[in-house]
Amino acid sequence: MSSVLFVCLGNICRSPAGQGVMLSVIEQAGVSDKIQVDSAGTGAWHVGNLPDSRMRGAAEARGIILDSRARQAKASDFQNFDLIVAMDQSNYDNLKKLQGPKKSNAHLCLLGEFLDPQNPPDVPDPYYGDGSGFDQVLDMIEQACPKILQTLLEK
Ligand code: 4NP
């Protein structure tokens, strides 16, 4: 069994989308029994909430239902997951602080590492934008997830 945790700031827009798209990619590949997927936020403001309705709508238009509940990332995630995928550099830096000096199982990376180089390195935070950001987030995540799956299956 391999496991991946997607992390953003609020765990209501980008990382639940990562979780939902990844679950769909895994299901289509027929490897649901081999990979576990979760998501979390570095912040705690939205703990317990469903994903933002705008992100749920954009995902549903692509056939993906987002029904996770927000939780905050914790130090033990570095023991319990194989791969932790941060949506942007600020999430990555906050996760590094949470990880601390203790040796961990998880490899921490940026989602941008799985994208073609013409993409921005960070998945932009769509929360305060004009609404078009949700599809851009999904486009980036849909591009990255098959490569993330390949990485997990090669472990
Ligand atoms: P996310 O987006 O990190 O992609 O879930 C955000 C959601 C909420 C807030 C910021 C970003 N917020 O400040 O409440």
Image (cartoon, grey):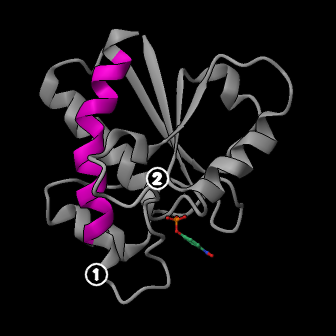
Q: In this view, does 31 lie to the left or right of 114?
A: left
For label 2, the crowd category at 10 Å Cα-Cα, with few meaning under 14, some 14 to 19 and many 20 or more, is many
Residue displayed at 80% across by 43% down: 97
For label 1, the crowd category at 10 Å Cα-Cα, with few meaning under 14, some 14 to 19 and many 20 or more, is few
- What's the distance in space between the residues labelled 2 and 1, CA to CA? 17 Å
Where does residue 40 sit, x and y in percent of width and height?
Answer: 58, 48
Does 122 appear above or below 117? below
Q: Residue 120: give its label.
A: none
Q: Is residue 154 magenta?
A: no
View extreme (front): residue: 117
Picture quarter with the C terminus:
top left
Residue displayed at 33% across by 10% down: 154
Residue at disc 2, secondary structure: helix
Where does residue 109 sit, x and y in percent of width and height?
Answer: 53, 36
Q: Please, what is the three-letter code of the amino acid marked with disc 2?
A: Ser
Residue highlighted by disc 1: 132
Where does residue 78 sit, x and y in percent of width and height?
Answer: 68, 27
Closer to the N terminus: mark 2 or mark 1? Answer: 2
Residue highlighted by disc 2: 15
State which region is magenta.
135-152
Q: Is residue 134 left or right of residue 75?
A: left
Magenta region, main secondary structure: helix
Beta carbon of the mark 2 residue lies under 8 A of ligand 1: yes
